[in-house]
Image (cartoon, rainbow, N blue to C red):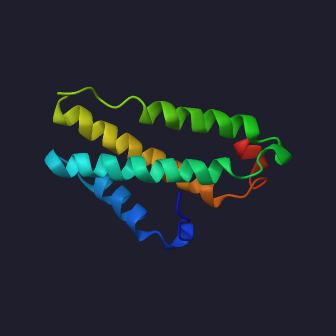
């Protein structure tokens, strides 16, 4: 996996999130947004997983969070799903991306009482 630019300089990620949440996406745009969000989520998961959460007793909760993200990515609406169901899925991925971005920006030990 190629190295990613620092999180603060990822305007594409924030643009995809905003585009998904600011209005209900539809049609081909919806499929592109879902693909882009999935791509970003996989990379964010790798960044979060690479941190030493165990040192601060946060490894189990972060593991549960990552398992939840994987489950969401593995459960898209089925073929032929209505546009509304696919739009809701895209918006769920965007919110998940926002939350995971926050965790990727955090350092192990930050907010230990909140994360653990």
Q: Residue at x 26, y 26 (%)?
A: 78
Q: Position of residue 36 (x, y in %)?
A: 35, 53
In the displayed orientation, state which residue is furthest to the front.
Answer: 1
Q: Is residue 77 left or right of residue 40?
A: left
Q: Position of residue 18 (x, y in %)?
A: 34, 59
How many marks can you see?
A: 0
Q: Residue at x 29, y 58 (%)?
A: 19
> Which quarter of the picture shows residue 85?
top left
Q: Is residue 25 left or right of residue 57?
A: left
Q: Is residue 24 visible?
A: no
Q: Position of residue 61 (x, y in %)?
A: 69, 36
Q: Residue at x 67, y 40 (%)?
A: 62
Q: Residue at x 42, y 70 (%)?
A: 11
Q: Nearer the viewer, residue 99 or 48?
A: 48
Q: Position of residue 4 (x, y in %)?
A: 53, 66
Q: Is residue 30 left or right of residue 106?
A: left
The quadrant the C terminus occupies is top right
In the displayed orientation, state which residue is furthest to the bottom.
Answer: 9
In the displayed orientation, state which residue is furthest to the right.
Answer: 55
Q: Is residue 20 visible?
A: yes
90 above or below 12?
above
7 above or below 41?
below
Q: Nearer the viewer, residue 90 or 73?
A: 73
């Amino acid at each position: 996996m190629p190295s990613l630019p620092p999180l603060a300089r990822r305007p594409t990620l924030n643009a995809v999130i905003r585009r998904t949440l600011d209005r209900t996406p539809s049609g081909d745009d919806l499929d592109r947004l879902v693909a882009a969000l999935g791509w970003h989520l996989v990379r964010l998961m790798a960044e979060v997983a690479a941190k030493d959460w165990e040192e601060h007793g946060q490894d189990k909760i972060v593991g549960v969070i990552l398992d939840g993200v994987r489950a969401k990515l593995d459960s898209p609406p089925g073929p032929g799903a209505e546009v509304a169901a696919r739009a809701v899925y895209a918006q769920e991925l965007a919110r998940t991306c926002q939350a995971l971005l926050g965790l990727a920006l955090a350092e192990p030990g930050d907010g230990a009482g909140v994360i653990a």
